[in-house]
Amino acid sequence: MAIPTILVTPPEQRALLVLAHGAGAGMRHPFLEQFAQVLAARGVGTLRYEFAYMEAKKHRVDPPAVAAARVREAVAEAAKAAWARCTWRASRPSSARSPSR
């Protein structure tokens, strides 16, 4: 099951930041929205994600092991998103190819 995320990818993206919310606000908080737009204007994409307790609409934060697992999931999602945007992965330079025998 995919976790809830919001991916912002500027046209000339040069980095991707995985961005978590605080204990009192979710990934759609206006501050995070604005922060993501400011970063995008500077070529930094963001992947915001929801912790499990916020997704379940609970008021108590997740235990550390559950929170850490969600962070790992978000980083994996970001890696997939970044890889999907890579243009160089399909065309390697000739020096990177295996020599012919």
Image: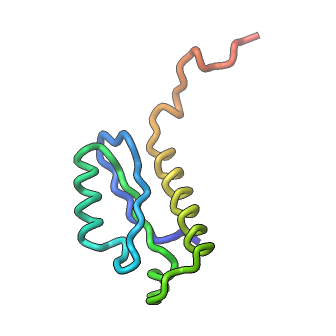
Counting from the top left corner in percent of width and height, residue 76 is at 56, 56
Q: In which quarter of the image is residue 47?
A: bottom left
Q: Residue at x 38, y 59 (%)?
A: 7
Q: In which quarter of the image is residue 5?
A: bottom left
In-image side of 34 versus 78 (left or right): left
Q: Residue at x 53, y 52 (%)?
A: 80
Task: Work out which quarter of the rendered image holds the N terminus and state it.
Answer: bottom right
Q: In this view, does 2 lie above or below 95?
A: below
Q: Which residue is drawn at 40% across and 77% down?
A: 23
Q: How is the image coloured?
A: rainbow
Give 101 or 38, whichever is nearer the viewer: 38
Q: Is residue 61 above or below residue 35?
A: below
Counting from the top left corner in percent of width and height, residue 28 is at 32, 72
Residue farthest to the top?
101
Counting from the top left corner in percent of width and height, residue 6 is at 38, 64
**So how many labels did they put on this image?**
0
Q: In this view, does 63 lie above or below 69?
A: below
Q: Is residue 19 above or below residue 64?
A: above
Q: Residue at x 24, y 71 (%)?
A: 30
Task: Work out which quarter of the rendered image holds the C terminus and state it.
Answer: top right
Residue farthest to the front?
64
Counting from the top left corner in percent of width and height, residue 92 is at 54, 25
Give 83 or 30, whichever is nearer the viewer: 30
